[in-house]
Image: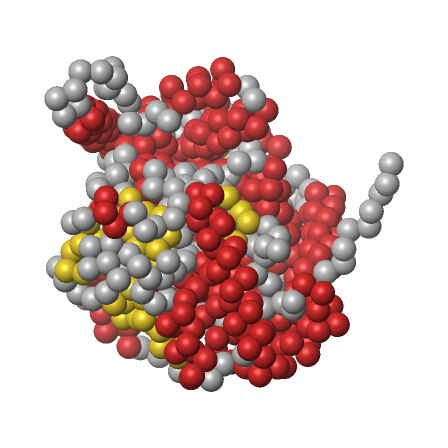
């Protein structure tokens, strides 16, 4: 009897907290739609950026970690699944490396370096939504053993160069989303227009999910595609 | 000194309650009838079956649970037999109450500073050479005081002389390792209610915990040695690893070159 | 000076109510005695305070010694981020046990007596000494965090030098008293219900304390993430859950073997109240968590680990309360349910523990962000245009 009473008391408190929390989350989500924009980006200073929005981090072992960058992640929204090549597969720079799914949208990312797959992130496979939120840490996807690293690195950006490049990409994306593709995000624009029209409007996280297939393919080609 | 005890022959008890009253007077307890042992009644007489009176009191175990469990040693089994209580040592954890197989110790729940209460076998009177107040008061000799061995002999004799009257069992001879208070009965003890219904082992209860407690020194010594050993091995392993890392670094940065004093600690930034 | 009213939230109101009730019953307990606040009686001398605040409390604080063992003795450095929160919880947990004792002991001001009056035959004596010493060890272990905050580097270094012997001592003391809490009940073979009474009680208590230690570390991490935004990385907790699977499987196995050996396995299926409680407890404490952890999605998700840990913790609490209270109800000839005052005080103490944890986590460097070698410093672009 006593044991049951204590157990129920604890469960009661936990449930109460869950209720409080869910009310809070609901409120926060409404605020988020209004506020989230692309002005906060972390750029780790020792990470190389491949123009197809994947990043490379060189591990002490000489292998490299690969993932998609924060920009791509935010545009896509919650990553619900990743498709990863198996261990031992050899990849070339600019070749398709992995695929992510969000809602009914699928996007492929290119490998930033030549190399052989030696490791995959199991946490990312099992729980991609959470893991991907932290794009440069828990959000890594593959470990590659590079075979041509020095040459591969030449077209990648790091530190100040990466920051400048990313700023340009964000500007380009804004044009794409709010300029010629205005119709894709009409509702967001209307929502925002009063507040931020002077700097060209704000973007919301996961807006790709609300675009049509044509625009998504366009995004994939323009932003994630191969550059020389 | 041989241990003393009390023999309670329930076939002789007439339920007059003289022992209860004598005990209360002797211990300055509030007078008045009580049905159960309590902080104000160290002994009670209860009619457990029609016409059969059972007197309850502390059993003064030979190897008492209460003495063994008390963290501060507030209970003592004296050489003369009584199990006595030192109220100044007691911290009030009530482990003695929880574990006494006969549920004897009682507590002053209504006091701000409470003590444990129970029969002391009138230890001070025994020391003076007299007998407990309750046995002295018994008008029919249902409770008699004496040396435990002599009481056992007397009980055996009564059973032998009158096998039809008594069940062939001296309660307290072996229960919980034996007690200084012994009972005789005309009906099987398990029909007499608490505490006789309880299935008590003949092994003294303190031995059950001692089996675990006696391992303590071993655990301390073995645990200490094993843990220190493991720590030594793992720290050695880490040192070796560090050393290897350092030498590797050496080769990596010096392919044929001489400069740059190179065995830089990789940990240092 | 500007005084600002703290923001009123639902939780703060609840905490205020709990504190008010707690203080009221505290005053009552110390001015009117145990009988006025509790439902304890001569027939039932141990209740919620002994069962929950003390015996369960010590078990729930077991995380500290397990993590200290892992990090300092086995030197598995990955778990270092868990070390400080675990030691903090341990320290707070044991402090609460000490405070709980001050409520429960009839002569609470004599709580120090075991230091001078010895009875080495008493399990309670051994537990008292171990808990006292271990509380000291925990205080020393945690003091380095305080010294760090106060910038007393010399003292911090001193503790650092002592840390290995301290943790070895801590592990030994914990092993002793966690199992001895089980030995407390070895002396009541005739009173405790057969499903629970076993000569192996010390072993059961120890193993289940290890298991709940892992679960508590996980729970703490989530709670502090929830309330303070600081926590532990998921993959570390995942590792703990894996080890816990082994511990729980071992626990379940030895329990079943013991029941079979004593020939009381059949009682598991009986419809007696105790048997049903035993079944519920075992389900919640080990069977359900084991099944849950077999599912990879549960093992790798924050919510999954939280729910599993909650099961383990609740099951553990039920187990300890079943043994201290439910298991002896039948032989006591009475039934016991705590008085409102007992519940109020227990909830009050737990709440104080939570507040103390939150306070420490806020002002001390408890959740250390250990920077890994491949984790770079971060530059932030503000203001794109
Ligand atoms: S009957 Fe109980 S109180 Fe009396 S000596 Fe035996 S164990 Fe102690
Ligand atoms: S209540 Fe007093 S006499 Fe009884 S075990 Fe505790 S300290 Fe000893
Ligand atoms: S021996 Fe003394 S204390 Fe015990 S019941 Fe008899 S009179 Fe009372």
The residue located at (27%, 43%) in the rendering is A59
- Give above or below for B238 relative to A92: above
Residue C38 sits in quarter: bottom right
Residue C90 coordinates in the image, percent (x, y)? 46, 41
Q: Is residue A54 left or right of residue C253?
A: right
Q: Residue at x 45, y 58 (%)?
A: A70
Residue C269 seen in the figure: yes
Name the residue furthest front.
Answer: A228
Residue C17 in view here: no
For the point 38% across and 21% down, which residue is it?
C162
Q: In which quadrant of the rendered image does the N terminus of chain C lie?
A: top right
Closest to the observer, B52 or B242: B242
Question: Residue A194: percent from the left, percent from the top?
Answer: 75, 72
Marks counted in the figure total 0
How was this image coloured? secondary structure
Most foreground residue, B86 or A195: A195
Residue C96: quarter of image: top right
- Asked if residue A89 lies left or right of residue B94, the reply is left
Relative depth, front residue between A11 and C10: C10
Image location (x, y in percent) of residue C29: 69, 47
Percent across and percent down for residue B104 are 48, 49
Is C88 on the left or on the right of A156, as rendered?
A: right
Which residue is pictured at 86% across the width and 41% down the height? C2
Q: Residue at the far right: name it.
A: C1
| Image quarter in which the C terminus of chain C is found | bottom right
Q: Nearer the viewer, residue C124 or B231?
A: B231
Toward which corner of the image does residue A200 lie, by quadrant? bottom right
Residue A105 to residue B91: above or below: below
């Amino acid at each position: 009897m006593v044991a049951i009473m204590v157990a129920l008391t604890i469960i009661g408190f936990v449930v109460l907290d869950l209720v409080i929390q869910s009310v809070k989350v609901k409120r926060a989500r409404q605020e988020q739609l209004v506020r989230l924009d692309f002005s906060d980006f972390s750029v780790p200073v020792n990470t190389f950026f491949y123009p197809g929005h994947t990043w490379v981090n060189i591990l002490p072992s000489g292998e490299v970690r690969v993932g998609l960058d924060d920009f791509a992640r935010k545009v896509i929204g919650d990553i619900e699944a990743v498709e990863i090549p198996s261990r031992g597969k050899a990849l070339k720079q600019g070749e398709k490396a992995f695929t992510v799914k969000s809602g009914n949208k699928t996007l492929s990312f290119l490998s930033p370096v030549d190399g052989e797959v030696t490791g995959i992130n199991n946490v990312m496979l099992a729980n991609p939504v959470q893991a991907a939120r932290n794009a440069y840490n828990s959000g890594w996807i593959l470990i590659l053993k590079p075979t041509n690293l020095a040459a591969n690195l030449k077209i990648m950006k790091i530190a100040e160069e990466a920051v400048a490049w990313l700023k340009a990409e964000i500007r380009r994306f804004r044009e794409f989303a709010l300029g010629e593709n205005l119709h894709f995000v009409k509702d967001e624009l209307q929502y925002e227009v009063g507040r931020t029209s002077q700097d060209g409007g704000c973007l919301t996280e996961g807006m790709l999910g609300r675009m049509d297939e044509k625009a998504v393919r366009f995004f994939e080609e323009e932003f994630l595609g191969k550059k020389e | 000194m041989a241990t003393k005890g009390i023999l309670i022959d329930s076939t002789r008890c007439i339920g007059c309650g003289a022992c209860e009253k004598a005990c209360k007077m002797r211990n300055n307890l509030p007078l008045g009838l009580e049905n159960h042992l309590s902080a104000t009644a160290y002994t009670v007489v209860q009619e457990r079956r029609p016409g059969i009176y059972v007197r309850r009191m502390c059993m003064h175990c030979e190897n008492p649970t209460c003495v063994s469990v008390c963290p501060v040693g507030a209970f003592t089994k004296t050489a003369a037999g009584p199990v006595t209580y030192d109220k100044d040592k007691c911290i009030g954890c009530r482990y003695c109450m929880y574990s006494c197989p006969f549920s004897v110790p009682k507590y002053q729940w209504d006091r701000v500073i409470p003590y444990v209460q129970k029969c002391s076998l009138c230890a001070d009177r025994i020391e003076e050479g007299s007998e407990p107040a309750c046995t002295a008061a018994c008008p029919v000799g249902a409770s008699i005081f004496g040396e435990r061995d002599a009481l056992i002999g007397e009980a055996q004799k009564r059973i032998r002389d009158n096998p039809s009257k008594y069940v062939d069992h001296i309660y307290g001879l072996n229960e919980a390792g034996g007690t200084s208070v012994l009972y005789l009965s005309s009906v099987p003890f398990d029909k007499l209610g608490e505490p006789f219904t309880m299935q008590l082992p003949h092994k003294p209860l303190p031995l059950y915990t001692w089996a675990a407690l006696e391992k303590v020194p071993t655990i301390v010594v073995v645990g200490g040695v094993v843990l220190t050993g493991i720590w030594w091995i793992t720290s050695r392993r880490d040192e070796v690893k560090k050393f290897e890392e350092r030498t590797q670094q050496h080769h990596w940065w010096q392919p044929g070159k001489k400069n740059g004093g190179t065995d830089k600690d990789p940990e240092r930034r | 000076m500007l005084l600002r009213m703290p923001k009123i939230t639902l939780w703060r109101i609840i905490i205020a109510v709990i504190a008010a009730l707690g203080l009221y019953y505290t005053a009552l307990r110390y001015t009117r005695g145990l009988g006025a606040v509790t439902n304890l009686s001569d027939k039932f001398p141990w209740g919620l305070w002994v069962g929950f605040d003390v015996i369960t409390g010590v078990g729930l604080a077991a995380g500290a010694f397990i993590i200290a063992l892992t990090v300092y003795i086995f030197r598995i450095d990955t778990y270092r981020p868990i070390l400080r929160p675990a030691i903090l919880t341990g320290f707070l947990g044991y402090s609460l046990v000490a405070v709980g004792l001050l409520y429960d002991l009839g002569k609470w001001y004599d709580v120090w007596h075991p230091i001078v009056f010895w009875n080495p035959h008493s399990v309670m004596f051994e537990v008292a000494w171990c808990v006292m010493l271990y509380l000291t060890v925990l205080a020393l272990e945690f003091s380095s965090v305080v010294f760090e905050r106060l910038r007393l580097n010399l003292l911090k270094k001193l503790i650092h030098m002592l840390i290995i012997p301290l943790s070895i001592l801590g592990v030994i003391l914990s092993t002793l008293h966690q199992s001895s809490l089980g030995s407390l009940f070895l002396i009541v073979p005739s009173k405790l219900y057969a499903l629970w009474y076993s000569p192996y009680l010390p072993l059961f208590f120890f193993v289940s304390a290890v298991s709940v230690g892992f679960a508590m570390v996980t729970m703490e991490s989530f709670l502090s993430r929830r309330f303070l935004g600081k926590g532990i990385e998921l993959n570390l907790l995942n590792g703990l859950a894996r080890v816990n699977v082994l511990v729980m499987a071992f626990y379940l196995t030895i329990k079943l073997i013991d029941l079979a050996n004593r020939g009381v396995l059949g009682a598991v299926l009986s419809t007696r109240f105790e048997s049903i409680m035993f079944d519920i407890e075992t389900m919640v404490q080990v069977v359900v968590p084991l099944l849950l952890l077999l599912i990879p999605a549960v093992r790798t998700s924050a919510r999954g680990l939280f729910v599993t840990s909650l099961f383990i913790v609740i099951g553990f609490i039920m187990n300890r309360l079943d043994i201290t209270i439910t298991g002896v109800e039948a032989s006591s000839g009475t039934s016991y349910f705590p008085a409102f005052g007992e519940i109020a005080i227990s909830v009050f103490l737990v709440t104080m523990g939570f507040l103390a944890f939150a306070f420490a986590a806020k002002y001390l460097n408890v959740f250390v962000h250990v920077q890994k070698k491949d984790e770079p410093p971060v530059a932030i672009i503000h203001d794109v245009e």
